[in-house]
Image (tube, rainbow, N blue to C red):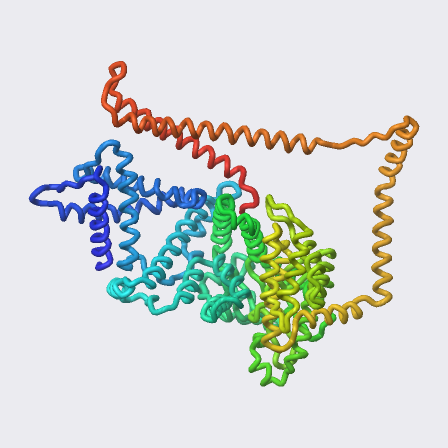
Amino acid sequence: MIYFVIRILVNAIALAITVIFTPGITVQPLIPGIIDISPTYLLIGALFGLINALIRPVVLLFTARLLVRTMGVFALIINAFLFWILSIVAPQAFIIASPKWLWIVLGSIVIAIVVFLMEAFFGLDKPAFHSETEEQFYWKWVAYLSAGRRNAIAENLRTAQILDIVMRYTKDIAVDASPLSRFRFFMEDLLYRDVDQLQELTMPEKVRYMLQELGPTFVKFGQIVSSRAENLPPEWQEELNKLQSNVPPFPYESVRKILIDELGAPPEELFATFEQDPFAAASTAQVHRATLHDGSDVVVKVQRPNIDVTVKADLNVLRDLSTQIQRKQEWARNIDLRGLVYEFADGIMYELNYRNEASNARLLARNMADFPEIHIPKVYGEYITEKVLTMEFVDGVKINDVVDIDAAGIERAPLAEVFINAFMKQTLFDGFFHADPHPGNVLVNLDTGQIIFLDMGLMGELNREQRMALADLLISMQQKDGYGLGKAAIKLSKPLPGREVDEKAFLEAMERFADRFLKVDEPDLSIIISSLQDTIRKYGMRLDSDFTLVIKTLMQAESIVHTLVPTMSITEQATQSVVTLARSQYDADQISEIIRTQVTRSAREIVYRLPSLVEATTKWLDQYEKGRFEVHIDTGDLDNQVENLSRGFNQAINRLVMGLVLAGWIVGSAIASTFEGEIGGFDLSKLAFYMFIAGGIVGAVVVVRGLWQSRADDDGYY
């Protein structure tokens, strides 16, 4: 009750301030003598709160994506619309001067700013961690409202939720750092006595709570940051690391329903035993221990309910946002922000299909068969779907748990060597590697000493040329060869959009890079890699997406190795591992087999091309007899590209001209509506007002048509 009273008072004060600073708006008593000016402000404040609570969510449900596409400018239109509704609901109290639309827009801006600030100071929008958004009942209905390739309702809903959560936490953090923090703390204690307090938490803790409340997509982003948080303060590292495991579980009832939908039977029939309490919870799923009817101990990974709808919406919103930022900000173009977001999105969508993870586990197990010290859990295909994954239960501790490893009598140096050898085998020889080896995904069995890889949802792949370039890069780093490092980096990079690469200048810069970062007593791999990426971007390139995963994995591997053996150099050990593995992988028989395979492939290719070779030879002989050679260049694709470019340019010019005409129409009619006079017997101000309304309708139609056409142009969205 106190909350609503304070909310009405805040709205009334905001309305009074708006009237003071907006001379075209006045408020008069509803019923003088009975409902005087002060009660009028309170009643209008209550109406404004009701409009915001009931109408704003409906408007955002259909228009929230426009906030992203216009970088927040569309919020002015939403606020003006709500303020206009307020003036319609209480016309006898509001007196708005002409031109009415102008004062409505200005008034909506003032009242929005005042309410925003007062909400922050009074703690009316205090963040409080609650159940995650994908668990809310309406998401399963939203999933059926998809239109085309994108679910507009889901994206609008998620955009509104994201903005609300981010603003709540931002206000809390901002006021917490201001002299008004004590007043906000007092108000929060008054308004939210039964809610866990957040004001005693540090900023890193609040950011972690915010990421968890935003949902799996943002938790995954925080996990990526935590895996490369070596340059962050310790308190930030600690909180972001909690995102790897400190994620609230979802109810068993949801787990049971998903198993029935996916596997066709309840867990009590599918398994001999099934523990209702989760064994572990992650950002996208949770894990339950179970026993098969043959006695095998397994874990069942169940995807969070409705996560596919919310994650797709999140990723599409992030893609829209990154596209808009890259168009307007040079720093975003320099790092190709849009490309990075697209790669992040593709990786998450791949991970959400657990059949991919099962296939990855089988392939990784086959590739690691020569390493008895490495174990990959077995997968059970009959209990696997897109949302359910059943794997062998393995027992172990995190590979960075050196206390338990030492207590078990396992030597750390050989353990680190095995880990590096396995990583080198995966990346340089197989071209298929575990791309998220944080300590929670790499265990050590204290009884056998085996290293266990978990969570094969995110895997990296490298082709032969990339593997050779990676080997060259590692050897160049070990030999402190800046030129060789630069040549390898070029092979593993691609130019940024609209940038030209000066290879000579880049290689010269890499020579200086080697002097600064490689030719030191104890080079730090994380600093070297971070500086290398900065240098690559400076000269108009960025690392290929596949190799970006290698870099991330290499840095995670270095962190594990340094935890096990602080004095071990991962680059030197990796170089030795390459030589050792090359000797063991490629004996005389294997090399002969590779040569036979390549010769056979070449012979087949020649056979396939024989008819075209005969035809080409005949044409050359004909041209020789005529005494001239002719070269034919097919420009059909170029003609099509030029035609498409011309068509697009013409459309852009037409839209620009139409926009200018409409703007002149609307602005001119708005100005004319303030003049008095007649034209042909018609009142000038009324005629101009009707012209203004007509221009607004035409403009709205043009905007809707443009947005509708942009939906058809969406490429790569889910």
Question: Residue 10's x, y, as percent?
Answer: 23, 53
Query: What residue appears at the point 27 percent right and 50 percent down from the top-left corner?
Result: 114
Q: Is residue 602 left or right of residue 159?
A: right
| Front residue of 419 and 146 | 419
**Residue 175, located in which quarter of the rendered image?**
bottom left
Q: In the image shown, does 712 or 173 lie closer to the viewer?
A: 173
Q: Residue at x 48, y 58 (%)?
A: 218
Task: Look at 67% across and 63% down and name the residue there.
Answer: 362
Can you see residue 342? Answer: no
Pick out the residue farthest to the right: 625
As drawn, 518 above or below 697: below
Q: Residue at horizontal 42%, vertical 46%?
A: 156
The count of marks equals 0
On-image quarter of the N terminus: bottom left
Q: Can residue 640 be seen at all in this image of the molecule? A: yes
Q: Is residue 52 left or right of residue 26?
A: right
Residue occupying the far left of the picture: 33
Provide residue 638's location: percent of width, then percent of height. 68, 33
**Which quadrant would residue 78 be assigned to in this image?**
top left
| Vertical placement of residue 449 versus 42, above or below | below
Q: Position of residue 76 (x, y in %)?
A: 34, 42
Q: Nearer the viewer, residue 513 or 657?
A: 513
Return the x and y of residue 706 as percentages of the image width and height.
47, 34
Answer left or right for 20 relative to 545.
Answer: left
Quadrant in the picture for residue 301: bottom right
